[in-house]
Amino acid sequence: MPQAGTATVTYRVASAVDGGVIVIEQGGGGTTYGTINVPNTGNWQSWVNISHEVQLPAGNQEIGLIAQTGGWNLNAITIEVETTCMPNCQTGTVVQAEDFYQSGGVQTQTTQDVGGGLNVDWIDSGDWMNYNVSIPTSSTGLYDITYRIASGSNGGSLKLEQPGGAVAYGNISFGGTGDWQQWTTATHRVSLPAGTNQLAIASTSGSWNINWFEIKAVN
């Protein structure tokens, strides 16, 4: 880390059981940077990305991972440092969750997440939200979609799809965060066809809130 600040830590995990918890800490212990719940992905080789933001000190880091609760596999860990975007750099498109043009079964509320504003709540299985979006240009057609979610229960899962559900682009599961205003991020990689300008988020299980989602091109 060139300076102390925020880093996004992404884990590539798989699990056939519920209740896994990862703790990221300073190598050798002493300082805990954060914890994250590992979802039940349905199979020991069904892989998803889960992410959370942690605060790291400046300088070279020795990082340790602890299985606070076991029952999961780990394939990779990625740490992305938050940096200032210089002119002409490419950034993702952030869509505020409350900016849907059509929805079913959801409400909005004042959020306690960083940045304030509203988040969407009361999301249960079968609820959905449709969005007009501006998709960044991608030479590969691949995109990392990151969701800012919170769940005071056991988490849930969602499907990114074409409005109306005719075409599904990808699915992701996430664990509970401990509180309806305790926020974390979850990311998966999907392929989107050229010319996409509408997306839908459909809840496939659980009870959860969402504050925003980000669409970032993979080039």
Image: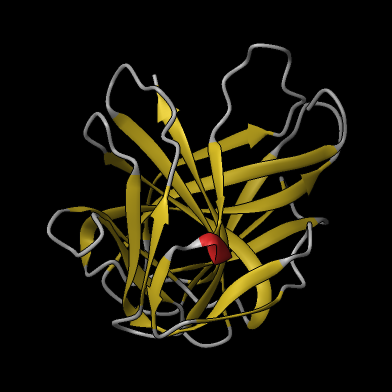
- Which residue appears at 78% of the width and 64% of the height? 116
Residue 75 position (above or below residue 14): above
- Where is residue 2 drawn, in percent x and y? 83, 22
Front one among 211 and 14: 211
Quadrant for residue 1, please give it.
top right
Q: How is the image coloured?
A: secondary structure
- Where is residue 102 drawn, in percent x and y? 39, 69
Residue at the extreme front: 101
- Which residue appears at 82% of the width and 56% of the height? 30
- Where is residue 177 drawn, in percent x and y? 59, 75
- Which residue appears at 23% of the width and 54% of the height? 162
Front one among 43 and 149: 149
Quadrant for residue 194, please give it.
top left
- The count of marks equals 0
Residue at the extreme top: 88
Residue 149 position (above or below residue 206): above
Residue at the extreme left: 166
> Which image quadrant: the C terminus?
top left
Residue 219 position (above or below residue 56): above
- Where is residue 120 drawn, in percent x and y? 56, 74
Q: Is residue 186 left or right of residue 39?
A: right
Front one among 176 and 199: 199
